[in-house]
C-alpha cells in the first residue's frame, strides 16, 4: 500500500492533506510492533489504505492533534475520525469493514480472545489448538505476532526453546500471506534497534 | 440478587456447587471497584445472577481454578464457561444478553468509548497509591496528578458537549469508570473535581441512575473497609456484616 516504505515525517514537516474518500490512513512507523498489529489487520482484511510513517524520535507538532499521546498507530478516515491504541484500531477495522471477520461472533469466544490477549503466552500450555483462537489464524494471533517477529533480532529465540507449541505456532504464522507480505528483515530490525537506543532521529528511516 | 451481601468465602472453604441453569454467577467482593463494574452491568441489563463474595485477604484454593490470576470479578455460567478481567466481563454481558445495549453499535462510537477508557486508566492506580500513602506521607503530588487526570476527562465532556461520556444518555463507559468516583468521598478527594464543573455535573447525574443508587456503597462502610484492608485483615472484605 502507498507510503509503507516512505521516509517518516518529522518535526517541522507540513501537516498532511485530508484523507481522500474511500481510503483510510494509518500513521505508523516501520519498526513499531504496535503499529504492525494494525498493518496486519489492514492487510488480512484487504482494506484500501495509505500509510504515513512518523519519526518517533522527532515528532511533527501536528501529530499530537491526531493522537494526544503522540503514539502510533493512529487511524484517520475521510470524515476526519481518529482512532488510536493499537488493539482499539484493530477491533475498529474488523467491525467497520466487510470481508472476513477476524474476531469471532460468539460473545464467549470473543471474551476468550481478549483474556488471551491479557495472558499472552502463559495460556499456550493450556491450549490444545494450533493457534491462539482455535485451529485457524484469527485476531489474537495477529495481535501478538509482532513481538515474536522481534525475537530473532533481539537474539531471544532461545526463549521459545522450551515451548515447542509456541515454536510450531511461530512457524505456522510465518507461512501466513499477510505476515510474510509484511515481514521485517532481521538485519533491518537490528539496525533500527542500534540507532533507536542512541536516540538517533535517523532510526525510524533505517534502510531507506 | 442472592449472595451480594453474604459473607465471603475464604481459604479452606468448600468449592461452590455448579451454577444452576438460567443463572450466571459472579465472583465478587463487596468493596472491589473492578467487580462493581460487572455488578452495575448485571443490574442495568436486568440479568438474573447470583453473587459469591471472595475473601481477597485469604483466598480459597479453588478460586484459582476459576481465574488463574485469583482476582475478582469472574463470571461463571451453567456451562462452566469462565470470563475474567472486569472490562471483558462487561462487554461479554452486553453481547451475550438481550435488552438494552450499553455499548453503541457504531464501530467508531464504540472505539471512542474504548479510547476514553484508556484515558481514564491512570485513575485507579492513582487512587490505590493515595490510599496506601495518605497517612504516611505528603500526598499533594498525587492529588495534583489526580486533578490533571480529571481535567482530561473534563476535556472529553467539553469536546463532546454531552452529559455523559458516550453521549446524552448513560452507557457502558460511564459504568466502567463510576466505581472510582464513588470512592472519592471516602478518600477525601472530592476537591480534585473542583475545577471540573462538567465532571461534577456528571457525578451528580450518575448518582440518580437507578442501577447506581441500587448498588450504592455507604461512605462509612468504605472507610471501615479501607482501614482493615490496609492492615491486611482477613475481616476487611466482610466489614459491616
Image (cartoon, coloured by chain):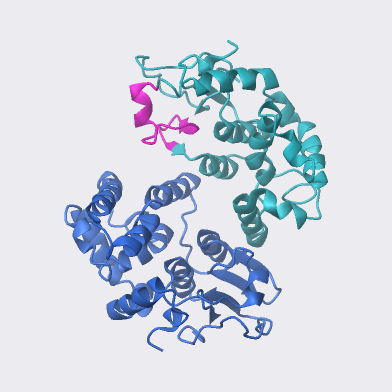
Chain colours: A cyan, B blue
Residue at the image position 82 percent from the left and 41 percent from the top:
A168
Residue B216 shows up from this direction: no
Residue B236 is left or right of residue A129, and the answer is: left
Residue B105 position, x and y percent, is 49, 53
Residue A81 included in the magenta stretch of the image: yes
Where residue A53 appears, x then y in whole percent?
50, 21
Which residue is rendered at x = 63% and y = 41% of the image? A143
Kindly indicate the quadrant of the structure image that contains residue A60: top left
**Does the magenta segment cover residue B188?**
no
Residue B231 shows up from this direction: yes
Q: In this figure, what is the number of numbered marks? A: 0
Pick out the residue farthest to the front.
B136
| Relative height, residue B103 to residue B96 (above, below) | above
Which quadrant of the rendered structure holds the C terminus of chain A? Answer: top right
Q: Residue at x 65, y 68 (%)?
A: B82
Q: Looking at the image, is A13 positioned above or below residue A158?
A: above
Residue A159 at x, y = what percent? 73, 40
Specify the quadrant of the image occupied by residue A91.
top right
Residue at 34% across / 24% down in the picture? A62
- The magenta region covers A59-82
User: Hey, which quadrant is residue B33 in on the image?
Assistant: bottom left
Q: Is residue B17 left or right of residue B32?
A: right
Amino acid at each position: 500500500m502507498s507510503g509503507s516504505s516512505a521516509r517518516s515525517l518529522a518535526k517541522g514537516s507540513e501537516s498532511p492533506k485530508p484523507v481522500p474518500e474511500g481510503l483510510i490512513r494509518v500513521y505508523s512507523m516501520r519498526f513499531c510492533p504496535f503499529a504492525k498489529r494494525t498493518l496486519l489487520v489492514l492487510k488480512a482484511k484487504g482494506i484500501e489504505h495509505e500509510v504515513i510513517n512518523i519519526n518517533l524520535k522527532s515528532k511533527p507538532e501536528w501529530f499530537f492533534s491526531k493522537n494526544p499521546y503522540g503514539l502510533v498507530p493512529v487511524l484517520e478516515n475521510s470524515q476526519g475520525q481518529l482512532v488510536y491504541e493499537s488493539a482499539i484500531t484493530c477491533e475498529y477495522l474488523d467491525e467497520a469493514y466487510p470481508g472476513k471477520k477476524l474476531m469471532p461472533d460468539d460473545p464467549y469466544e470473543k471474551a476468550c480472545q481478549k483474556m488471551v490477549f491479557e495472558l499472552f503466552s502463559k495460556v499456550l500450555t493450556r491450549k490444545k489448538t494450533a493457534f491462539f483462537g482455535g485451529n485457524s489464524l484469527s485476531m489474537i494471533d495477529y495481535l501478538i505476532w509482532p513481538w515474536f517477529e522481534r525475537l530473532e533480532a533481539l537474539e531471544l529465540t532461545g526463549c521459545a526453546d522450551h515451548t515447542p507449541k509456541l515454536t510450531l505456532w511461530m512457524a505456522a504464522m510465518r507461512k501466513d500471506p499477510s505476515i510474510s507480505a509484511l515481514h521485517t528483515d532481521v538485519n533491518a530490525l537490528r539496525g533500527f534497534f542500534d540507532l533507536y537506543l542512541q536516540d538517533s532521529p535517523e532510526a525510524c528511516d533505517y534502510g531507506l
